[in-house]
Amino acid sequence: MELTRRDALAALAGAGVVGASGAAVLRRDADGATGEPPAAETVETATAVAEVIYPAAVSNVPEFVETYLSGRLEARPEHRAGVEGAVAELDRFADAFYDVPRYVDLDADRRLTVLHRANVDENDPDPDGGPAERVRYYVVNDLLFALYASPTGGELVGIENPQGHPGGADSYQRGPK
Amino acid sequence: MSGAESDPSNAERTPEPRADVCVIGAGPAGALAAYRLASEGHDVVILDAGPRFDPDSRIERMERAIRPAHPDPEVWDMGGERDAYSSGGERFYPLNSSRVKGIGGSTLHWQGMVMRNHEADFERRTRDGVAADWPIGYDDLRPYYADAEAELGVAGASDNPFAPPRNEPYPMPAFEPSYSDSLFAEACERLGVSMHSVPNARNSETYDGRGSCVGYGTCKPVCPSGAKYSADVHVRKAEAEGARVIDRAPVQALETDRSGRVATARYATPGGSEYRQAAREFVVACGGVETPRLLLLSESADHPDGLANSSGLVGRYFTEHLFCGAGGLLDAETRQNHVGFLTSECHQFYDDPGQATEGTGGSIPGSDADLGPIKLEFLNYAGPSPVELAMGAAEFGDDLLDSLQDAYGHNIAMGGLVGQLPRKENRVTLDTSRTDDHGNPVPDIHWSLDDRTRRTIRRANEIQHAILDELGVDVGWTVGPENTGPAFHHMGTTRMGADPAESVVNPRLRTHDVSNLSIASSSVFVTPGALNPTLTIAALSLKCAEHVDERL
Ligand SMILES: Cc1cc2nc3c(=O)[nH]c(=O)nc-3n(C[C@H](O)[C@H](O)[C@H](O)COP(=O)(O)OP(=O)(O)OC[C@H]3O[C@@H](n4cnc5c(N)ncnc54)[C@H](O)[C@@H]3O)c2cc1C
Ligand code: SF4
């Protein structure tokens, strides 16, 4: 299932960055960026995480992550610092466990192993917690929120209007397909 | 937070030089009273303990509501020293989950189900021989109910054969029943149980300048679209009528003059100053817990037991609605969690909780036990929300998706409410061993359950299990008398009555003891019924405003 631009915009709408129509992002595309775009390393690292925490059934992950992160970080500077800090933690984990400087340089198996060995899977997300808790909050859960609160992510699970997505007041009346 | 959020320190918070009415509390009770009195041309000032929230922050608050790192009270900034409390009773009472402080009050967080009380709710002593009758009846409140429904904006249908009589249609059409309601409908028909719509303070179409529901599904604790009514709507309307709002201004005490009338409300500001707001009339609308607390904090040489407390009943008869429910898995898709509100309920066991039923394919046996009213609900958000599950999971990728697919899709559940009997020993007092951020003793909630309430919860479970069994549900959980919890409806504590020895306010919502002090709140309820209280609060508040207006 392809993650579309509409999914990224829906995820942004759910995160309060743009109106449900995605007007702000579209405008930015037309007029040139207003805020500071996220650093390329941030987008690359988040994409590397998304590729292992998203199910294999979704495609077009890099574009989805980039659109989502750009919109979100430009709009929320206080969140941006948290995401950048968590990305730096991921690089430190990669260095500690596999002696490579950057998380993105690991293959997919090792990227997943890092998340498990650093206890990012077991730790509770906490924006003010330790490294694993911050990675869980700012990177892993940001990306899971973006996916599973979007129409495509919802549909994978069987709900086309997941919590957090303003998908109208009709879907709840419909029976199973 | 953006600029529209109220400034914690610098905003102008000096008193209004000329005020006819000082309303304390900006939840639905205070907001409606203030709006009505300002519309009548009076100078109104509203003081609220909490901030004015920026409407644009609601989306971020919704994210907080969904993400597991943020507990529910954090969504609306509850907790901390400002909201410290004790729970000294038999049962723990989770006060900070059950209210919000700020412009809009607890309706920022509420679910938004709004029903008129049944006629029997006002006559519990006469009909059942328990508790006490209200000094007013349904007919007295009837015009105010209609008014309240128009103000809040209620989507409803006249399809409830058990509801009290009404003349006028609801302001908006009811929400269509959910798919899972249709599953329940078949089982209910086979058992002879009637389902009907839920009146919702939620826009099913554009109403009063607010758009219709777009299905974010997070109504409780936050509706980002504004389709769900919250009382900040009427605070803005009151302001448009000339009222002034002072936020982050917790009232510390009401001070009386030599004639025994309230002269000023002494309030604190974030900058550390204290001011006194004078007015001709005062309306306290601080909710069911802070209202008695404020009266108790207002003790003085003239009022050694607290203000308006010659009966000794301020804080007493604290009552709640108890949740009862059951749910489990069905071997079919149930389509839950698309929206965060209910579309169907059942009042059949309200006035006659022990009745037996007989349907096309089965029956529910009767009970001749002494029981209170029961409201039954058919939930649209049974089971986990996939997005919340994902963020709490300990696995990723395809494993995570497999687990989500396993967990989502087959849950189904019923809820319900039962009102407890008012008991004198259930009460709000001051805990002088702990203080809030202004050095005031914190509220202490003494809460316990009586046997009649427990019995009624058991009866509700019996009916719920019968329906779920008929539907073929593999029942996995039940909330019964042992594990029940409060529905977050604070009632009692400054009860209404004709006799000053037995009550705190009179039927005109004015305190017996103090001639210019009124109370707009569920704290004046004599008995709780089993229906969500806010429409009745709103109706009483409009009645209160009318009587204040008559005196001005
Ligand atoms: C999770 C949840 C779900 C609910 N669902 C429903 C529902 O579906 N249907 C329903 O009918 N009801 C529901 N309720 C209850 C409903 O929210 C309350 O009945 C209603 O908000 C009470 O209105 P109020 O104006 O009396 O008090 P509140 O809304 O609590 O407002 C009181 C205000 O007073 C202010 N205040 C307190 N002390 C002071 C002071 N000393 N000085 C100045 N200001 C002060 C507070 O800051 C607050 O803003 C729900 C409540 C919760 C928490
Ligand atoms: S379901 Fe409707 S009322 Fe509830 S949060 Fe969404 S838009 Fe608001």
Image: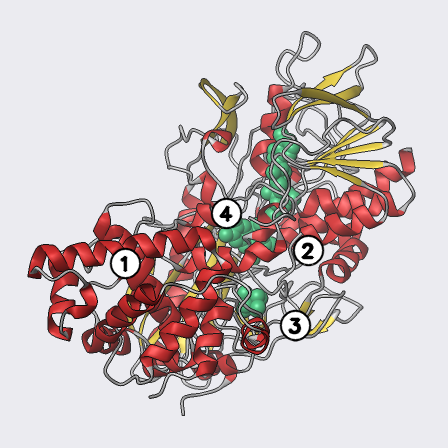
- Residue B249 at x, y = what percent? 65, 31
Q: Chain of mark 4?
A: B
Mark 2 to mark 1: distance in Å? 62 Å
- Callout 3 environment at 10 Å: few (<14), some (14 to 19), or many (20+)? some
- Residue B465 at x, y = what percent? 35, 68
Asked if disc 4 is less than 8 Å from ligand 1, the answer is yes
Mark 3 to mark 4: distance in Å? 26 Å
Q: Chain of mark 1?
A: A
Mark 3 to mark 2: distance in Å? 32 Å
Question: What's under tag 2, amino acid-wise?
Answer: Glu
Residue beneath label 3, please? Answer: B212
Residue beneath label 1, please? Answer: A87
Q: Secondary structure at mark 2?
A: helix
- Residue B478 at x, y = what percent? 32, 60
Question: What's under tag 4, amino acid-wise?
Answer: Phe
Mark 3 to mark 1: distance in Å? 40 Å
Q: In this orientation, which residue lies closer to the viewer: B434 or B289?
A: B434
Residue beneath label 4, please? Answer: B488
Residue beneath label 2, please? Answer: B119
> Mark 3 or mark 1: which is in front?
1
Residue B382 vertical position relative to residue B235 in the rendered view, above or below? below
The lab-note entry on whether marks 3 and 1 share a chain reads: no
Q: Tell me, yes or no, whether the two marked residues, 3 and 1, touch with CB atoms within 8 Å.
A: no
Question: What's under tag 3, amino acid-wise?
Answer: Ser
Q: Secondary structure at mark 4?
A: loop
